[in-house]
Amino acid sequence: MTAGRGGRGPCPARSVRPTPSVFRLNPLVLAALAPVAVLFAGSVAAPALAADANAAAPRTADTAAAEPTGGGTPGLLTPAQSCRIVDWNRAARSSQRPADDAGGDPRLFLEADSLSGETGVALRAEGQVQLRRGRLSLQAEQLEYRFSDDRVRASGGVQLWRDQDYYSGREIELDTERAEGYFIAPRYHFARTQASGGADRIDFLGKNRLSVLGATYSSCEVPEGETLPWQLSARRLRIDMDANEGLAEGGVLRFFGVPILAWPVLSFPVTGERKSGFLPPHIGIASTSGVELGLPYYWNIAPDQDATLTPVVSLKRGVAIEGEYRYLQDGWGGTVHGSLLPHDRIRDERRWALGWTHSGGLMRDWDYDWRLLRVSDDAYWTDSLRGADSLTPRLLESQGQLRQRRTLQLGSIGEVDQWLYARAQHWQVLQSTLASDAIVAPYQRAPQLGALWRSQHGSLIGSLQGELNQFTRVQDGLITGTRAHLLGDIGWQHRDGGWQLTPRLALNAAAYDTVQPMSDGRTRASRVIPTFSLDSGWNFDRATALFGRDLTQTLEPRLLYVRTPWRDLAALPNFDSARLDFNTNSLFSPNAFSGVDWVSEAEQLTLGVSSRFLDAGSGAQLATLGIAQRYVMREQQDAPDGRQPSTGFSDLFAVGSINAIPHWSLDTSVQYNADSQRVERSIGSVSYTPGPFRTVSLSHRLQRNASEQLALGWQWPLRGPTPQLAPSPAHNAAQAAADGMAAQRRSNGAGNGSQCEGTLYGVGRLDYSLRDKRVSGAIAGLEYDAGCWIGRVVAARQSTGSSAATTKLMIQLELVGLSRLGSNPLGVLKDNIPGYTLLRDPKADLGLAPGSPSGSSGVSTLP
């Protein structure tokens, strides 16, 4: 069996870069055993093992108490981590690390109670021996050093530091000229992964080759006699750095003593170079597919190409194959991914998905890209099959475009930014068999040709855009044709301190040539619609105080006048326009519609005012309140969508947010109809976050006569010690004393491990439709953080129709300092639970890299 590198991130030029999203034994081998092979290699080997530029400064026992011992969120003290993650300083606390006076000096520094021998020939040191050479520090009871072959032999409580890593053992002998020798019963502790391990013996077989017997690795630390929560072991390891190959024999990964992964022989890379081979399997469970098991194979084709092939077995649907191919050249690159289920046992048909993204550059200022996403049938998304991830799962877009952006110098006008573009856009609509769940697809554009120019000359601003579009239909019954349009505006910005005034004149012109006749029988038509607007705003502020707190309060009124004449647009086609939602942005927009085709008649005045409360010292925003309303000044004709606008005042729109109360935040927006004296639309949310990994949020959404929903999200510790904010220096001192007492109790046999208790968290989100009286979506799960391992069980239910839903169960075991096993629920939790905080550093919680064939499942190695 071969362990490859896969689940990669973005590629660099001419080389596909490996990322942490691979399963490998490097934490045990590359970061641990391989450096031992050249510990005494002197100035020749030292450059190959240069210290990590991001490595922390050397730590001592005096500073140990002030540092977190796990890989958790910065600024937090997680009790579970402090009792389970290996403590580098406690491991080495029995003897103080020698001062690193030598720095990078290749010369040898030797101190001892007794020194004997002949300089230039051999030296023998006894009693508290300390040897330093470059980044290497060694302590032992006895040490012999021969100058002729640069051979070192140390015995009796050997302790060795290299950078931030610590090693100990009974005896070590090494010929640094040929890098040959041995290390008896070594133990090692690594600061980077906060993990440790040991071996029966390490044999150095040359500068870049070694053999290790009885190797172990774990980030867990328990009292002597207890079983480690997890441990990786191998009967024998052979390392050949020149060949970029490691060979593990009899490898076993145990969880609380129970083997969960094993392999007779495993080959893996030992350097940063990629290597073809198998990746660990991933497991998924879904109501639509049952249990799924995939075994990815990574193929390192060339420095600028790679691929991953994954056979997948589904108990319900049968055998499928998934694949991803990545390529990168100078100036262009892309990814092709697909999934094929030759025979779906449930539907008795072939199912497939295909995606392709590509981007690149051409001549000066020109670039291009395209993306393709297609599936075999309409039910692909309801069956939750793999390979068709999209933000709009029922509306799959494929498009290609060519763009140029450059800056023109036009004499007295000055600089003009220019964009030229050509685009084609197509949609695949996944319709439901139920008429109530049907959706209307947007038009396809093939082609779309356009140009845009923007310029600002002093207070004068302007833009001009021209486009030609050919609209085709996805569904029958829609009118098709060509539209050419011109959008232009010119304005004058005047600013004077806290006041600004902007008069603006805009023009929307369009010409249509349709294939099918319009409602009035014509196939050609055109119209020109001008718009004049006058926008003004003020900004006032004053010092005030509230509840004994010094504040700065702002008052920011805004007034917008818009005049647009009516044009009869009822017979003209509508290719891309829709009415805007009623909110602050739409109230202060000259047009009530998006797109080009529909332009609303207007002679109206919009007035709004907002006020912010800022902390006088920090400037933090504690609260904001705003209100806006539109006044229609004269009776208007029917809007293009058939809605009859009324004169007078529009609905009142109000927004507000409060963050002044510690741990609490409140946000709300309300659309109020004064005529009916009721709320037409509202969104309100409140959240409570009293500390790390503790958050509860509740939101309510109402749209009168359409929908009303409640959403509850949470992340909360249910049992065990809970994280606290970073402790004070006084607390650190007390904790250091407590650590010393605990260590003494352990040495006296008093510790039984009962103090090492993990933390159980509940996580989830519940969406409930008050109108339909049903749960429209639900996520519920548990996370258990034991410090050196984290277990996650998350169930997610997604509505796929008015009476249909799919359920997924995601189970993940994260071995801190090594890998994640199982299906990854972190993306689901982060995207759906407001305020959710990862239990580990976000940099370590990336899951599989974008484009990975295993999607949200698989294994990733933590930094």
Image: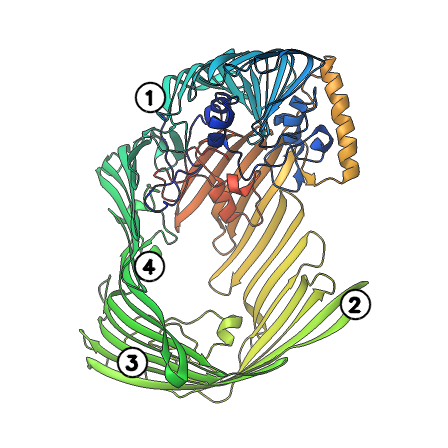
Task: Report how far apart the C-alphas of labels 1 and 4 lie in the structure.
Answer: 49 Å
Q: Is residue 411 visible?
A: yes
- Residue at the spot of label 4: 439
Residue flagged by tag 4: what amino acid is it? Ile
Q: Secondary structure at mark 1?
A: loop
Q: Is residue 518 visible?
A: no
Front of the two marks 3 and 1:
1
Left or right of 455 on screen, residue 571: left
Q: Position of residue 788 (x, y in %)?
A: 57, 28
**Colouring method of the image:** rainbow
Q: Quadrant of residue 564?
A: bottom left
Task: Report how far apart the C-alphas of labels 2 and 1 lie in the structure.
Answer: 70 Å
> Which is nearer the N-term, disc 2 or disc 1?
1
Q: Which is nearer the eye, 508 or 498?
A: 498
Numbered tag placed on residue 510 in the rendering: 3
Q: Position of residue 547 (x, y in %)?
A: 80, 63
Front of the two marks 3 and 4:
3
Judge whether 659 appears above or below 389 on screen.
Answer: below
Assess disc 2: are there few (<14), some (14-19) or many (≥20) residues with their C-alpha within 10 Å of its C-alpha: few
Q: Are marks 1 and 4 in contact (CB under 8 Å)?
A: no
Q: Secondary structure at mark 3?
A: strand
Numbered tag placed on residue 545 in the rendering: 2
> Which is nearer the N-term, disc 3 or disc 1?
1
Task: Report how far apart the C-alphas of labels 4 and 2 lie in the structure.
Answer: 53 Å
Judge whether 355 appears above or below 130 on screen.
Answer: below
* Residue sticking out furthest to the right: 548
Residue flagged by tag 3: what amino acid is it? Ala
Assess disc 4: are there few (<14), some (14-19) or many (≥20) residues with their C-alpha within 10 Å of its C-alpha: few
- Residue at the spot of label 1: 1
Q: Secondary structure at mark 4?
A: loop
Left or right of 570 on screen, residue 704: right
